[in-house]
Image (cartoon, helix red, strand yellow):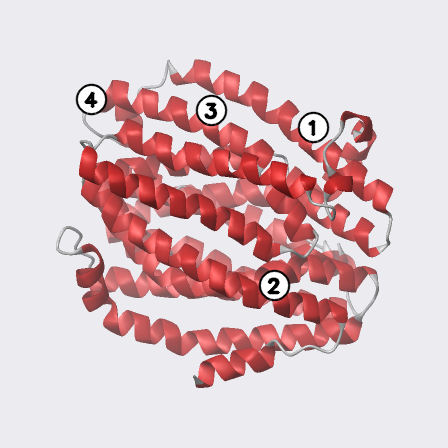
Amino acid sequence: MIMFQRLKKLLSSENHRSDNLKKNVVASFGIKGINILTSLLLIPITIDYVNPTQYGIWLTLSSIITWISYFDFGLSLGFKNRFAEAKAMNDIPLAKQYVSTTYALMALIFIPFCLVLLVVNHFLDWPSIIKVSASYREELRRVFEILIIFFSADMIVKTLFTLLDADQQPALSAAIRTSGQVITLIIIYVMTLTTKGSLINLSFIYSAIPVLVLIIASIIVFKNKHYSEFTPLFKNIRLKLTGKILSLGWQFFVIMLSMLLIFQLINILIARNLGPEVVTEYNVAYKYFSAVLMVVMIILNPYWAAFTDAYTLEDKHWMKKSLSQLEKMCLICIPLFILMLIISPWVYKIWVGEKVQIPFISSLMIAFFTFAQTLSSVYTYIINGIGKVRLQTIIYVTFAIIAVPIMNYASQRYGIVGLLSIPTLTYLAQAFACKIQVGKLIDNQAKGIWKK
């Protein structure tokens, strides 16, 4: 109750921007609460449908396919800032052109990309890549085909999420995502009662349902009077805007590629060096501790576009107050992580039963890693909203260069604890540098690399 009262105080508002933030955060809490509960329920149900080893294989393959998202060349994040800037300046025609152009560019990237990957997939030896039995060869090839097709489609249609976030409407975005999660949960549960466990069926449900839900949601949203003027149309496509989107987007692209090498290889390295079942252990623990991160992200999501708006309009007072509120929020998270760590053995037992055993030292490291991610997210979301990401780019690239060999060696020598050391240090370094940068930008003292 005390924490809720403090959180309510942190969200107190004094202008229209803060009012909009508060409304979206409050709405998102209810929606995301359902989302968090759904994602937690999906884990034991999915493990029951297949088994811990197959679930680990699924997690490894799905983490590989998410690499596709890193090849939008930063278009979605660049679009997010440019759209928010155009709306802040009340330039609606330009905002409409950004929407149509971004949809067109995403299609031009991911349709050919999908076709190329489908061809390449026939030449890949998946059992050797993730070190599992050769008996999985054909099944893994078909699973990857399904993931390629639907994930590529998802990359195009989820531009709607970016649009809603840029328009400071993350609650609506969260509602659409949650709908897909809930439908997926229901179907997976029915399948556990009626069919035999299958990676192919699992991949189809997990990847196809969110895309279908998003397509239906897109039709509904663009028929709404508030967004009908932003409906993607050929006549509004302006490929000449590509450079403006990518002028910021390329830096996000470099950041995303660096993050791929640092964070998205975790499941791969665990699978290769420790086994698919340990992938399941890591993801169960990470999903547990990331419940705090998910709550923080509910609050943070609208701040990205809000800081774009505030920085464009030079509202320094609002930015200082918002930064202070977000830093206090991080302090509140510390006792939550400690409590979750203490009770984690009992939670795991109730949640996933005896099928998955997670060492306490692994939980400790994953809790610390997740807190570092939470802390870093506060400052990087502000910096991303402002659009001064050069320093952030340098930090991520530096760690990306050393990440793979160190993480590979550390995972073989020290297990999950060693593997997570580099990702954790990356987040901590990012948080430290971005905290300094945010202060300089708000106080108009940023020069050189701090202002780029």
> Which residue is labeled 1 in the image?
104
3D distance between C-alphas at marks 4 and 1: 40 Å
Q: Quadrant of residue 430?
A: bottom right
The answer to whether marks 3 and 4 mark residues whose Cβ atoms lie closer than 8 Å is no
Amino acid identity at mark 3: Ile
Amino acid identity at mark 2: Asn
Label 1 crowd bin: few (<14), some (14–19), many (20+), radius 10 Å:
some
Q: Residue at x 42, y 66 (%)?
A: 292
Which sits earlier in the primary sequence, circle 4 or circle 1?
1
Q: Residue at x 32, y 55 (%)?
A: 40
Location of residue 181 in the rendering, given as x and y in whole percent from the top left corner: 41, 46
In the structure shown, which secondary structural element does the residue marked by tag 1 occupy? helix
Which sits earlier in the primary sequence, circle 3 or circle 4?
4
In the structure shown, which secondary structural element does the residue marked by tag 3 occupy? helix
Which sits earlier in the primary sequence, circle 3 or circle 1?
1
Q: In this view, does 30 lie to the left or right of 452?
A: left
> Which residue is labeled 4 in the image?
134
Q: In this view, does 399 lie to the left or right of 271?
A: right
Amino acid identity at mark 4: Ala
3D distance between C-alphas at marks 2 and 1: 29 Å
